[in-house]
Structures are given as C-alpha cells and as structure tokens.
Amino acid sequence: MPELPTSALPVRVDAPTERRYAPSTDLDLLDTRQILRVINEADRTVAEAVGAVLDPLAVVVEDAVAALQRGNRVHYVGAGTSGRLGVLDAAELPPTFNAPPSWFCAHIAGGPGALLAAVEDAEDDVEGGAEELARCARTGDVVVGIAASGRTPYVLGALRAAGELGCRTALIAANPDADAAAWVDVFIGVDTGPEVITGSTRMKAATAQKLLLNAFSSAVMVRLGRVFSNFMIDMVPTNAKLRGRMLNILVEATGHDEEDCRRTLDAAGGDLRAALVALLAGREVAAARGALAGHGNRVRDAVASLTE
C-alpha cells in the first residue's frame, strides 16, 4: 500500500463533494420552502448513484456471508458521520435479525464519545485506526471502511492493518477517483456529486452511505436465511409492537387465522421459525424443529422436507 496521508487536509478541491452545486448558489437568498425544494431535488439523485455501484457491493455481501459462515466477523470503520452510520447499522442488526452482536463490529474515530459530540481531529489518527483494527480483527474478517472523501487517515490506517492481517477489505466513498481504490480488495465509489452546501458530506454522501449500508447488511441477513419471503423471522419480540408484528407475519405468511397462529406460536415458545414450518407443513412443532435442525435452520428447506 502506498504511503498513507497523515491528515485529511488539505482537501482536494477537485473531489466531487468539494465542487459547488449550481442550483444552490443562491441558497441563502431563498425562502424556507425553496431551500427544502433544492435539497430534496438533490437528494433524488442519490438512489440512482447507489444503483450504479451494486456490482461491487454484491461482492462485499458475498465476502461477508462467507466470513460469518466460517466464524469470522464484519467490521465497519469510519470517522464523524460515516462512523456514526456504521455504528447505527451494526446496532440495529441484533434486534432486527437476532444476529449475534459479535457478527458486526463498528469502529468510530474518537471512540464512543464521538457518537454524541464531534471529535474532529480523531479522523487524522492513522495509527489509531491501525491499532484499533489490529486489536479487534483477525485473519478472514471483512473490514468495510466508510469515508466520503475516500482518504480519511483513520479509515485508511485501519484498512492497512486489516490487509496486513489477511482480512478482506472494502471502502465506501463518495469519490469515484479516490486513490485508495487501489489499496482495497473492493472499492465502492458512489458518485453523489457536489453537495447542496459545498463540502457538507453529511448530506448526499451520507445518504448514499446509509442506503449502501442498509442494502449491504440486509442482503447479508437474507443470504444467511434470516428472512423468509420478505419477512423478518428472527427478530427479538422485546416490545408489544414486535410481538404484534410476529403474529401478523404468521397470519400473512401461512394464511391461517390469528387464533390458530397464536396457538401455534405459543406451542413453539415464541419461536417464529418453528411456528412457520409447523403451519406451512401442517405438522407438529416438534417435527418442525427437527426439520429446521436438519436443514440449516432454513424455513423453505424444512417445509419441503416435511411435505415431500
């Protein structure tokens, strides 16, 4: 890997996010509704930009699935807004998919304190990023760097250490021409273009990062069998809303009435997978559990084995 920058400054003025966005040059002269309209019109371009980088994203999804199946982990690394988005995505996976908390580990420059207050100089700590990953990652892990500029020192330091450890590395950047593209296994350079407020990458660049992380982790969970049809089947029913959703999933997925679904779910001890298989296959919960155990805990395969 070439020598890493020791600071994110000076910012490259030719980077897409540092150029001026022509429709917003008179932003300070507009009324409130006009300001919001300019921002909204700019935001509409983000989904299309994300759609252009789905091929490299799919590679990272497959890398992550393979890593988790063999007992490795996925790491997110970022600074500022990018780091907070990584923490947010990782935090949502255990309650949504009942994913073990150890599967996704988020690292943010400046540590936990940076979640609530900016620690602006932390992003320049190349060695801090390297030390964090060297301490937490191991061979075979997948490390996803998140950096709008594509050159944040903390992130690049972490990716360097990850590569030296034998991890698979990826970088999500809002700069398609970032030099770091040559330093990682997979580069995802999403072209979100200039920001409505010049250089404010908490806007379109961050929106693209959120979309990419949503798609990435959701696809990983689907590929790991934690979704049946388009239903979350491993969520943790920690509140009334989620308990109601679990019952609704059973009704929608099986076509059985609510009373029958509630009875089966109770018999399964709240195990939605077992209740699904029992109702779809027309078998007892014990048979459903056995079929799941023999077919990688996958609902469709378990049902097929009981109905052949």
Image (cartoon, grey):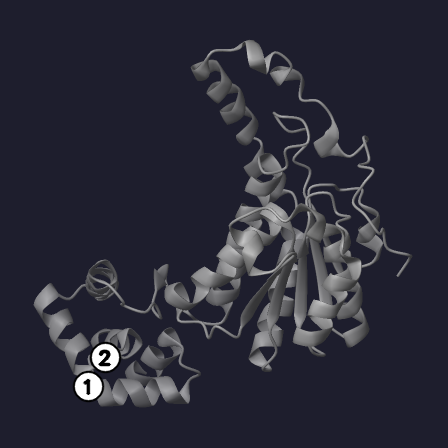
At a point 42% along the width and 70% down the height, the residue shown is: 226
Check whether the beta carbons of the residues at disc 1 and disc 2 lie within 8 A of each other: yes
Identify the residue under disc 1: 284
Give the residue type at disc 1. Answer: Glu
Identify the residue under disc 2: 278
**114 lies above or below 74:** above
Q: Residues within 10 Å of mark 1 (few under 14, many from 20)?
A: some
**247 lies above or below 17:** below
Q: Earlier in the sequence, mark 1 or mark 2?
A: 2
Left or right: residue 47 compared with residue 77: left
Circle 1: element type: loop
At a point 64% along the width and 57% down the height, the residue shown is: 110
- Seen from the viewer's position, the closer of residues 167 and 101 is 101
Give the residue type at disc 2. Answer: Ala
Residue occupying the far top of the picture: 29
Using the image, tell me which numbered label, if any, was put on residue 82: none
Q: Residues within 10 Å of mark 2 (few under 14, many from 20)?
A: many
How far apart are the alpha carbons under marks 1 and 2?
Answer: 6 Å
- Seen from the viewer's position, the closer of residues 51 and 86 is 86
